[in-house]
Image (tube, rainbow, N blue to C red):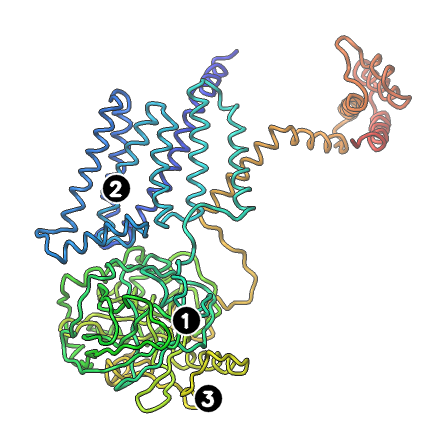
Amino acid sequence: MSVRSRVDGVLDARSGPRVGAFAALAVLSLTYVSVLYEAVTIAADGDPVVFGAVAAGALLAAAVLGRFLPAWLAALLTLGIAAAGGALYLPQVLGPGATPAVLDRFAADTVALLTGLSILRIISVGTWATAVVPVPLFLSWYLAARRRYGLAVAAGGAALVFFVLTGDATPETTLIGVLAGAAAVGLGDLDVRGGSLVSADAVAVVLAVMVLLTVSVSFVPGSAGQPLLPAGAVAGGGNTLETSLTDADGELTIQGAISLSPEVRWSVTSDAPDYWRVAAYNRFTGDGWVRTASRGNGSLGPPPGDSRPLRQTFTARSDIETMPAAWRPVDVDGYSARVTGFGGLQPAEPLDAGERYSVISRVPSATPTELRDAGREYPDSVEPYLETGGLSERFQEDVATLTSNADNPYDTARTIENALEESKNYSLDVSRPSGNIAESFFYEMDAGYCTYFATTMVMMLRSEGIPARFVVGYTTGQQVGPNEYVVRGYNSHAWVEAYFPGHGWVRFDPTPAGPRQSAEQATLDSAREGGNDDADVPESEPTDTPEPTTTTAPPTGGDNGTIGDDPVSTTPGFGGIQAPGGGGGETDDGFSLPTPSREQTVLGLVVLFGAVVGVRRSGAATRAYREVWLRRQPRSGPEADVRRAFDRLEYLLERNGRARRDGETPRQYVRAVGDERARRVGALYERAVYGGAATEETADEAVRLVDELVSERGWF
């Protein structure tokens, strides 16, 4: 045996399984590290460079200390790493003094973890992720360095399971982690027992089967793709805009095609029309929104600037769990309510049909001039509304160019609002894009509904350094009398609030009002024609009068109720903002193949590799090759053609009779098991090989005779 062969044998027997086990454990580690890294990139307090350095340090320490550090000391060190993470995280949350408000923030973080909510609900999630990542990394790789593969997988798997329970690990990520853990255990066992990598082909086949079985039964452990909605929150639920917006309890996932509900939810008596606000969200995850404050840590109070009072009385027309009110509520009467961290209201108990409550709100009344002069001296409390994690430099640069003519935050907001409203179509029938929703809508889609418009505007404002948040609730509804309105499910809506120093949060609505109201009216007409009794109440008569739009808060508004005097110039068509009817988006009827995600690509490669190994292990590839080889004989010269014809004959006789015995000559073999044609091919073979008498004619004859035999006996 050559030196190279001996070296290859050693590597295969000893190093192969170990390298494979380490590679599989690395994949498992990447699954939970990727979840933490995403949190770091989203959060304002996250620093990807620091996060990477901490993770690399944990891996290096594990590799070095795994050689000599005893297990009990490693356990103490792991606890020390966790304590150091806590020392890094707690001051970030508690600050210099443990005031009640600060303790509330810490309680919100703790509750988010203990109740299985997304880690993105944590206020200082970037710091938290950086503090957490070294713990499972160090422990799992320390154990791997000591060849304790099962325990190493258990440590890393526990981290992944935690993120499965919080809903932050996608089904694909979870499945990849499970497969990697199984591979690490299997290959690690081979390493410990001194097996060779050749014996690991069964592991590849098992992993491929696991993927196929998981897909075939539609069961993948992991988070659901849609938010969990409270039971009975809205009568006649389903995949409607209302359930996607007003029922999301702290987490809102942006959906694709969606429908409108015509059923009556509220009767409202109000001094003036307005938007009836339900909730606000501050953290954008790329495909949805989360609220990081706890449900009960807010307080009622007027906005900081000029405002006017607005009294409203809401009567529930169905069982419902929300408590709308015009911004900003300062007093509630008639029903027990909680105040959220964003100044909204939540009923202490769900409202039954017929129950009512009254609210007094102080509606901001700043003029455009006052807002233009508000400046940019933002308080620290609005820092969470400046997070731009995940936005590309291209997006931020294009937004900056779009708003280059605006020299103050108000004009910037009006420019963005007008650009979206004028250049994007309104449609409920859209396909939910992959990746960052705001950038996909900005660059790729030519139509969407309120969720897409509001999300994109919020992130465009933040990219310009303007605090903004995503808000949901209901538009005014159908006017049925002086100061009386009927609010239906299809009035559910999403809009934007931007912060102005000295004035507080001011509403902007980039969704085109006319097309939205047309879709709502069409839904109502269809419900009435279909005899839906829940689409009207006694005071709600069919009317041709269009739904009024809000002109309050701010007072002198455009179509969607935002402040407006002279429109600010926009640049439609720039930076992916498409003109109506143009662009590449979701309404294109052309055929296109779906683009798989990275996780789906990895799973596909696992299946492909397992299939290749399975085919090789079963010998099917060799048999398939032999079947082709037996039936197709390329011609290369008389002697070579005769030789190959005889090889084909011998293979055919072996498969249909017996193999040639040791010491048995070709002539003896064909005489014993072949017919007259086989003997003739044997004679031609002897003349060609031993007598050098091969010609084109003898080669043609040998090939023809073997082809005849194959056609008669070649199939199993």
**What amino acid does circle 1 point to?**
Tyr
Q: Quadrant of residue 44?
A: bottom left
Q: Is residue 129 left or right of residue 202?
A: left
Given residues 656 and 479, the one toward you in this image is 479
Q: Residue furthest right?
A: 676
Q: Would you say 535 lies left or right of 368 here?
A: right
Query: What x and y, as percent, mark residue 494?
Result: 34, 71
Where disc 2 sits, the SS reads helix
Earlier in the chain: of badge 2 and badge 1, it is 2
Closest to the observer, 268 or 412: 268
User: Which of the two marks, 2 or 1, is nearer to us in this view?
Assistant: 2
Give the x, y percent position of residue 528: 51, 82
The first of marks 3 and 1 along the sequence is: 1
Q: Could you tell me residue 250's position as x and y percent?
A: 31, 60
Helix or strand or loop: what does disc 1 sit on? loop
Vertical placement of 194 versus 261: above or below? above
- The residue carrying mark 3 is 542
For this orientation, the residue located farthest to the left is: 97
Q: Which part of the image, by quadrant, shows the C terminus? A: top right
Q: For label 3, count other residues whose C-alpha is less than 10 Å away and answer few (under 14), some (14-19) or many (20+).
A: few
Mark 2, residues whose alpha carbon is within 10 Å: few (<14), some, or many (≥20)? many
Residue at x 33%, y 79% (from the top left corner): 315
